Image (spheres, helix red, strand yellow):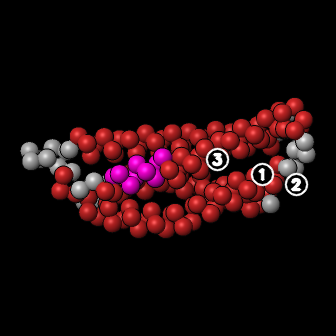
Amino acid sequence: IQWLHVIGGITWFGTVIYTDLILIPSIQTLPLDQQRSAGEAIGRRGTQIIIPVALAVIVLGILRGTVFGPIKSVDVLIGTAYGWTWLIALVLAIIAFYWGLRVLGGAVERLNSFPLEQVTLADGSSNPAFVAIVDDIKRKAGLEFLLFLAIFTAMILMRFGL
């Protein structure tokens, strides 16, 4: 259970790190039509992998903390530092899952539906509406990254019994 939970967590968090720091900046150097094609292909494959992995990480974390871990009662859950840290990590993981699927995913859908012919204005400048969507995605991706840092911190604290 622990091994699967850790491998899944590495996969989920690693995907966020790779996407935010390497993939998105690299794709942004391509022409817009290629960005959209690459982004759609990567998004389809990523969704097929990350949704089940993220769900498995959450379920395995619940099992790891309860059935195979120290949380056997509500008293342990709310009466110990480990219980609170575990609960915070669980809530943050559920938020991160929702955030990636609905909030960030919705922003990417808005980007993908933006008409390519409207990205650039007649004077050659970028359409402010398009720039706002891209900036929104960057902010949301940054917040997702911070969520994962908080989860990762909670995992470290639990390792030390806190």
Badge 2 is on which residue? 68
Residue found at x 25% / y 42%? 129
Q: CA distance from mark 1 to mark 2?
A: 9 Å
Q: Give neighbour class at mark 3: few <14, some 14-19, many 20+ (Cα, 10 Å).
A: some
Q: Quadrant of the C terminus?
A: top right
Above or below, 10 relative to 133: below
Badge 1 is on which residue? 62
Q: Amino acid at mark 2?
A: Phe
Q: Reading the chain from its start, which is encountered first: label 2 or label 3?
A: 2
Q: Secondary structure at mark 1?
A: helix
Q: CA distance from mark 2 to mark 3?
A: 20 Å
Residue 84: name its quadrant. top right
Along the viewing direction, whichever of 24 and 51 lies nearer the viewer:
51
Q: Quadrant of the N terminus?
A: bottom right
Q: Secondary structure at mark 3?
A: helix
Above or below, 117 relative to 95: below
- Image location of residue 94, percent across then percent down: 64, 47
Badge 3 is on which residue? 94
Q: Are marks 1 and 3 in contact (CB under 8 Å)?
A: no
Which of label 2 and label 3 is nearer to you? 3
